[in-house]
Amino acid sequence: MSVVAFCFIALAGCERHLPLALPVNAPVQVVEVGGDHYTLDPSSEGYRKLTQWVSNNRSRWSWGHYYATPPAKGIIVRAGTLNLQFFDSTVLARMPEGDYIKSLPPSEYAFLRRKPTAPDTRSGG
């Protein structure tokens, strides 16, 4: 095994602590790929839950570079330099120093999905 291959494997296996943070009092853009695009206002419940999620998930990230475009699915969150994509049982953090991946159950980011609104049953009268 070459030294380069060994270094790559060693780096990929290390867990990292990331300096994830939401900008103070700045809205967050949320894109449900193939669906809604909306903004989380700093005073909203969704923003509070995202702030808590970020605070609780700064550790246990693995370095992993995406050489291709990430999958066109899931939920993308953008705020300042924070760029997260949640899909399946994975979250991808795109940072200036590289890409990081973490496994998580989809229930951890379900709060980012817009709830379908009930159809309007009132008469159009």
Image: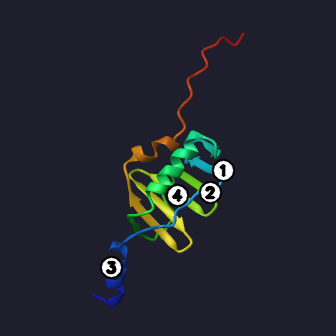
Crowding around mark 1 (Cα neighbors within 10 Å: few <14, some 14 to 19, many 20+) is some
Mark 1 vs mark 4, foreground winner is 1
The amino acid at mark 4 is: Leu
Crowding around mark 2 (Cα neighbors within 10 Å: few <14, some 14 to 19, many 20+) is some
Task: State which tag comes first along the sequence, 1 or 4.
Answer: 1
Whether residues under marks 2 and 1 lie with C-beta atoms below 8 angstroms apart, the answer is yes
Q: CA distance from mark 2 to mark 1?
A: 7 Å
Out of 68 and 89, give the one closest to the viewer: 89
Crowding around mark 3 (Cα neighbors within 10 Å: few <14, some 14 to 19, many 20+) is few
Q: Quadrant of residue 6?
A: bottom left
Q: Position of residue 45 (x, y in %)?
A: 56, 40
Residue at label 1? Answer: 27
Residue at label 3? Answer: 10
Task: State which tag comes first along the sequence, 4 or 3.
Answer: 3
Colour scheme shown: rainbow
Mark 2 vs mark 4, foreground winner is 2
Q: Is residue 17 above or below residue 103?
A: below
**Residue shown at the point (48%, 56%) measured from the top left:** 55
Q: CA distance from mark 2 to mark 3?
A: 31 Å
The amino acid at mark 3 is: Ala
Task: State which tag comes first along the sequence, 3 or 1.
Answer: 3
Residue at label 2? Answer: 79
Q: Quadrant of the N terminus?
A: bottom left
Q: Is residue 120 above or below residue 32?
A: above
Whether residues under marks 2 and 3 lie with C-beta atoms below 8 angstroms apart, the answer is no
Residue at label 4? Answer: 84
The amino acid at mark 1 is: Pro
Q: CA distance from mark 1 to mark 4?
A: 15 Å
Out of 117 and 104, give the one closest to the viewer: 104
**125 sits left or right of 79 in the view:** right
Mark 3 vs mark 1, foreground winner is 1
